[in-house]
Image: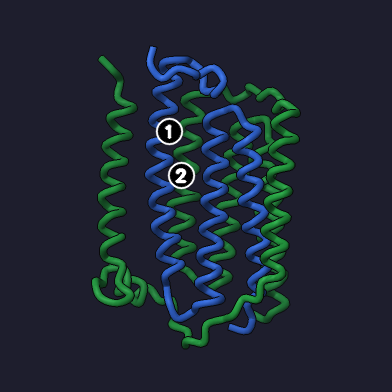
Chain colours: A green, B blue
Amino acid sequence: MGLTTNIWMFLLFSAIIIVFSFFTIFSRRILRAAVSLLFVLVSTAGLYFMMDYQFMAGVQLTLYAGGIVVLIIFSILLTSTINQKFEKPSSKYLILGGITAVFGAGISIYTILNHPFSTSTESEIPSTMKEIGVQLLNTGVNGYALPFEVISILLLAAMIAAIVIAKKII
Amino acid sequence: MNTLVPLSFFLIVSTIMFFVGIWGFIIRRNLITILMSVELILNAVNLNFVVFNRILFPGHFQGMFFSLFIVAIAAAEASVAIAIIINIYRRFSTIEVDNVSEMKN
């Protein structure tokens, strides 16, 4: 892919991301908000594909777009009626939140545009599945076995916690 | 490598996504939409980590592993949060945060 194609793809994905993030928070029907969130997550996976990180994109698609959005939609179906529309958010919060968001985004973008980022001069390593697997289960330098194990314990704890909390109290 | 889009473009997109998430966090009164805003924020942070890794430090995978762990934590957080939301709905028959002001009755 040439630079032009890449830039067009990037513009497409980022336009989808920005437009549907706004839909996610401003939509007054909750199921539409969840579907907009799905679009945002899938376009983010597209950006990962553009950067040649296929594994990360796959994780994004299966876990985020596949797992979390389905979980959210399930909980919507369990707790809300579909046709119900939200009230409009109160204008006080709308203005306060808008000021916060615009101010913060302005400062961040100003800083990003003025900061000289310097690329590291190390040679690029290919992001193959083999390299990722070796690093993920390695205990030496560039090894991530410890956080991997910590995350697995955390997932187990979260699973037990979710079951205990949602259990029907007899 | 040279065919990659400049770094600041990605950072601007993720900044906008992050602050839209914060805006939603402030204006929404429904627990599930608040959870969706949190997912937006986490997704923006993930994008930042991966882009920094890919463009500034292509010799490592640190940013990508951070993102992987953040995705796992987001999954754990979403499952526990949804369990809590269902429990709240069972007790109060609503998930608007304004009506759920007590933790134990």
Q: Is residue A141 above or below residue A101?
A: below
Tell me which corner region of the image, top left, top right, bottom left or bottom right, holds residue A11: bottom right
Q: Which mark is residue A121?
A: none
Q: State the CA–CA distance, disc 2 to disc 1.
A: 10 Å
Q: Residue at x 32, y 28 (%)?
A: A165
| Image quadrant occupied by the C terminus of chain A | top left
Q: Secondary structure at mark 2?
A: helix
Chain of the residue under label 1: B
Q: Nearest the camera: A115 or A169? A: A115
Q: Is residue A125 above or below residue B82?
A: below
Chain of the residue under label 2: A
Q: Residue at x 55, y 61 (%)?
A: B47
Tell me which corner region of the image, top left, top right, bottom left or bottom right, holds residue A16: bottom right
Question: Which is closer to the viewer, label 2 or label 1?
Answer: 1
The residue singled out by tag 2 in the image is A68
- Whole-percent x, y for residue A121 in the image: 52, 87
The residue singled out by tag 1 in the image is B82
Q: Secondary structure at mark 1?
A: helix
- The amino acid type, in three-letter code, at marker 1 is Ile
- The amino acid type, in three-letter code, at marker 2 is Ile
Q: Nearest the camera: A156 or A47? A: A156
Give the left or right position of residue B15, taking residue A70 as reference: right
Q: Nearest the camera: A26 or A102? A: A102
Q: Residues within 10 Å of mark 2 (few under 14, many from 20)?
A: many
| Image quadrant occupied by the N terminus of chain A | bottom right
Q: Residues within 10 Å of mark 1 (few under 14, many from 20)?
A: many
